[in-house]
Image: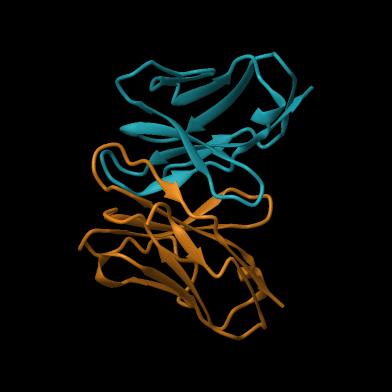
Chain colours: A orange, B cyan
Amino acid sequence: GAGVSQSPSNKVTEKGKDVELRCDPISGHTALYWYRQSLGQGLEFLIYFQGNSAPDKSGLPSDRFSAERTGGSVSTLTIQRTQQEDSAVYLCASSSGTGANVLTFGAGSRLTVL
Amino acid sequence: SQKIEQNSEALNIQEGKTATLTCNYTNYSPAYLQWYRQDPGRGPVFLLLIRENEKEKRKERLKVTFDTTLKQSLFHITASQPADSATYLCALDMSGGGFKTIFGAGTRLFVKA
């Protein structure tokens, strides 16, 4: 597509429920990133995928968080047994994966855990 | 590990003045450093990239410098306008030539008319 698309744009869930956030990157972009941004804070790196390489999961805060990227395109970030501290905006970005690594971001998915 | 430091205090300036934002990093110098703009409720948007062998880069009213000795980048907006009000984020790669990109916390800029 023309840009990075994320869904849902807003998600309200109850503590303990599982949630899935979806990211559709720019067509042809081989690198895909997930970041978390809490209110008034900077971007916290979560995970990134580059081509067929094993993803760098070093930023995932706990084993409740996981992500996959199917067919080198769409990615899903899953948060199991959500906690109130998981409330944040989850941003996805993609890049061409070559040369200078300029990231194009989606609008984000705002997660609220009650 | 690599850390990025940006002034957490908001910067308030008068329209027409030059805004200068600072980005400091702690460890190795990255292959390149980037600046992004973020408006409320939106994802960051790329503005400028500067490579380690470049001292300065310009784009319209924007100028970025990169001092690998000081481990610092400065971001300037000349002839600032109220529309420049936003949060500006500094970003760099975690390992030379790699693609894991981390961001600073950003500096909020307010330009008063």
Q: Residue at the location (39% across, 20% down)?
A: B69
Say which quarter of the image contains residue B96.
top left
Residue A113 in the image: above or below residue A103: below
Say which quarter of the image contains residue B8.
top right
The extreme front residue here reads A2
Residue B80 in the image: above or below residue B99: above
Q: Is residue A111 left or right of B25 when viewed as pictured?
A: right
Looking at the picture, how far across and down is residue A82, in whole percent? 59, 79
For residue B108, say whether it is visible.
Answer: no
Q: Is residue B61 left or right of B84 when viewed as pictured?
A: left
Q: Residue at the location (43% across, 65% down)?
A: A23
Q: Is residue B75 left or right of B7 when viewed as pictured?
A: left
Looking at the picture, how far across and down is residue A31, in whole percent? 31, 54
Q: Residue at the location (48% across, 24% down)?
A: B73
* Quadrant in which the C terminus of chain A appears: bottom right
Q: Is residue A67 left or right of A38 when viewed as pictured?
A: left
- Give whichever of B71, A30 is nearer the camera: A30
Residue B108 in the image: above or below residue B79: below
| Image mark count | 0
